[in-house]
Image (cartoon, rainbow, N blue to C red):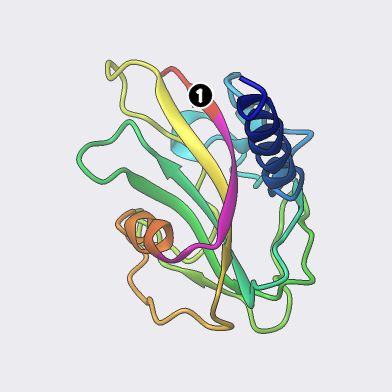
């Protein structure tokens, strides 16, 4: 029994060390599990289409770039992309509300709406509550080789990311 206690203590310490360096994503505009404000909603659904302010911390030292995505995960099978920003410099710690200009080197991929801009949530009427994942991804390459802006990018990012952080907001049409 004496040997088990130190092993449990070591495992507990290692587990807590791992979470201390995790990425964190925060927003004054989107709150975890809460409805997304009309301001961020796509115009066709009565909103102003203003991208929310987002900030993050805890980017791993091994990261060479960041990506930021907004995906409606309620659309099956692959989700629906609303905003895909890639090749963000690792020194970037936020995106301002209503972002129009990205840091040098960053680029926006075409969303499933067919636009290379922020396109806010706009679920079809009668489809129930939709979940929108706002995710920051830490990546091992300075430039990603992906040019396809569809929601399928989430699978590529999941396979290559060093770390990520997410906030999920909701919209009920």
In the rendered structure, the answer to whether residue 169 lies left or right of residue 173 reads right
Q: Percent from the top left, x then y, of residue 115?
A: 43, 62
Q: State which quadrant residue 138 falls in.
A: bottom right
Front residue of 142/159: it is 159
Q: Which quarter of the image is occupied by the C terminus?
A: top left
Tell me the chief SS of the magenta region.
Answer: strand
Return the residue nearer the eye: 49 or 149.
Answer: 149
Q: Residue at 77% x, 56% y: name it.
A: 94
Q: Which residues are magenta?
A: 160-168
Residue found at x 55% / y 35%:
41
Query: Does the segment drawn in magenta span residue 33?
Result: no
Crowding around mark 1 (Cα neighbors within 10 Å: few <14, some 14 to 19, many 20+) is many
Q: Quadrant of residue 134?
A: top right
**In-image side of 23 versus 114 (left or right):** right
Is-magenta flag for residue 166? yes
At a point 25% along the width and 46% down the height, the residue shown is 78
Is residue 143 placed above or below 80 in the rendered structure? below
Q: Residue at x 74, y 44 (%)?
A: 17
Query: Quick one: which residue is furthest to the front in this view?
Result: 2
On the rendered structure, is 121 left or right of 93? left
**Left or right of 63: which side holds 86?**
left
Instruction: Report x, y in % for residue 48.
Output: 62, 39
Query: Which is more toward the observer, 136 or 112?
Result: 136
What is the residue that sits farthest to the left in this orientation?
A: 77
Rendered position, 85 above or below 34: below
For label 1, the residue is 170
Picture quarter with the N terminus: top right
């Amino acid at each position: 029994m004496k040997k088990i206690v130190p092993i449990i203590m070591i495992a507990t310490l290692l587990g807590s060390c791992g979470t201390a360096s995790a990425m964190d994503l925060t927003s004054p505009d989107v709150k975890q599990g809460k409805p997304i404000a009309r301001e961020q909603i796509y115009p066709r659904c009565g909103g102003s289409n203003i991208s929310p302010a987002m900030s993050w911390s805890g980017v791993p030292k091994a990261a060479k770039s960041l990506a930021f995505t907004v995906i409606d995960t309620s659309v099956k099978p692959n989700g629906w992309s609303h905003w895909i920003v890639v090749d963000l410099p690792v020194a970037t710690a936020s995106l301002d509300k209503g972002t129009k200009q990205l840091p040098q080197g960053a680029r926006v991929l075409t969303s499933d709406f067919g636009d290379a801009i922020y396109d806010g949530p706009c679920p079809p009427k009668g489809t129930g509550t939709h979940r929108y994942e706002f995710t920051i991804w830490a990546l091992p390459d300075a430039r990603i080789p992906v040019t396809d802006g569809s929601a399928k990018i989430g699978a590529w990012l999941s396979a290559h990311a060093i770390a990520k952080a997410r906030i999920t907001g909701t919209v009920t049409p």
